[in-house]
Image: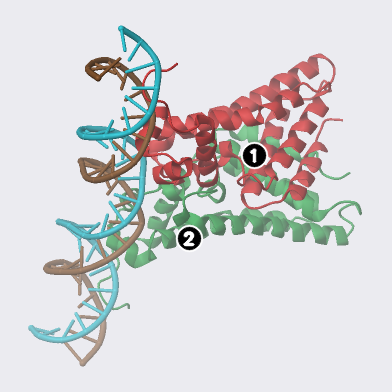
Chain colours: A green, B red, C brown, D cyan
Amino acid sequence: MALGRPRNFDMDQALDRALHVFWRKGYEGATLCDLTEAMGINPPSLYAAFGNKEGLFRKALDRYEAKHAALWTEALAAPTAYEAVKQLLEGSANSLGDKRNPRGCLLVQAALCGGEECDPVTKELSARRDASVALIGERLKRAKREGDLPAGADPGSLARFVVTVIHGMAVQAASGANRKQLEAVAKTALRAWPQ
Amino acid sequence: MALGRPRNFDMDQALDRALHVFWRKGYEGATLCDLTEAMGINPPSLYAAFGNKEGLFRKALDRYEAKHAALWTEALAAPTAYEAVKQLLEGSANSLGDKRNPRGCLLVQAALCGGEECDPVTKELSARRDASVALIGERLKRAKREGDLPAGADPGSLARFVVTVIHGMAVQAASGANRKQLEAVAKTALRAWPQ
DNA sequence: AGCATTATATAGCAATCACTACAGAGATAG
DNA sequence: CTATCTCTGTAGTGATTGCTATATAATGCT
């Protein structure tokens, strides 16, 4: 067993609470007072466990992505590229329309921009959003090789379009759009599929 | 002429400078120190002219929208609904890809979420974004009455889709997407047009 | 000139920010 | 038991936040 006094709180639960705060208020908007209160711990415990505010945010971000990983891996494993994108768009609409969660998407609204002190966070979020473009792009390149996409189709542009719509839905969700409206957007976007 | 000591700075230029700061750093991220320095004035002058930080932001927001009004009015005045939406999407791609401006869209990134003190700003931005959905929706309803849209088309959903793509492009632009990539997204989105 | 009025510059306000020094509590090891 | 180690709660750190009190400068009116 570990030496010294044992930790008095559950890491996963505390991280979930922190995630919830960052999700609602963004990186800059979430104060340490907000965070410690929601996590049920005092500042020294937070700093001992997570380093600092940015470290806590990165852990919460990992947790956020882990919760959405299933949707992405399952969607991208679909037999056809169209089916994969359909699952991504509809799954995103469904998730963003879930009223049990805070509105919107953490990767979009936590720090689209901000003061200088949150520059690394802004860059990190940007990189993770770009990663999803690359992920879909790889799936669509494979589809093109397999003849699952018309010869004229551009996997890169198509991937960027899909992610653009998902992030646009995240903005809509942040404004209060409901699941039905988001599903209609997803359905409309699918009409852009080549042939 | 006005009574008392005349103002020593140009309102429009100062507002442009403030807009630029809010555009890059968002509402919370822009400090009064950032703003006064960029505007070339001292805090008392700012407060005398604009009331407070939120008042200044609202004025900057008006100025931002005024600069984009031409694109919208001209696009919505196009003879067909398709041409109107085409101009909106391509115009947005062009504007968001302009490297002379800060990245992204002020209405999206200034305060998608935040601490409690910026709640009215978040709501104001949300309302203005919704207004653009309504604006396009009205144009598309007219198009349907005129037979310019198929009977099965839903003007409301279509309008929300268009705005969703534009806001998604704004997120892409905030991450550094260039004009060419944004134009490709706009082109792909237009394929979703009914019939 | 003298007064009223408005803007400016200096300087600093209370409140809040992210973060930490310190002492004690709770565990293991010997 | 004592020694050692790590976590916890209290209480606060200096820095920065949005904002303002005060005195002075610059104008028009009489």
User: What residue type is disc 2 on?
Assistant: Arg
| Residue at 40% across, 45% down | B33
Report x, y in % for residue C16. 30, 45
Side of B4 where C15 appears, left or right: left
Q: Nearer the viewer, residue B142 or A61?
A: B142
Q: Nearer the viewer, residue B174 or A3?
A: B174
Helix, strand or loop at label 2? It is helix
> Which label is found at residue A5?
none
| Residue at 51% across, 34% down | B15
Determine the image quadrant of residue B68: top right
Is residue A186 in view from this perspective?
no
User: Which quadrant of the figure contains the C terminus of chain A?
Assistant: top right
**Residue wearing tag 2:** A58
Report x, y in % for residue B140. 75, 22
Helix, strand or loop at label 1? It is helix
Q: Residues within 10 Å of mark 1 (few under 14, many from 20)?
A: many
Report x, y in % for residue B42. 38, 39
Side of A45 where A16 appears, left or right: right
**Residue wearing tag 1:** B167
Query: Do the CB atoms of the residues marked 1 and 2 lie less than 8 Å apart?
Result: no
Q: CA distance from mark 1 to mark 2?
A: 25 Å
Side of A21 where A169 appears, left or right: right
* Chain letter of the residue carrying label 1: B
Q: Is residue A102 above or below residue A178?
A: below
Q: Nearer the viewer, residue C29 or D13?
A: D13
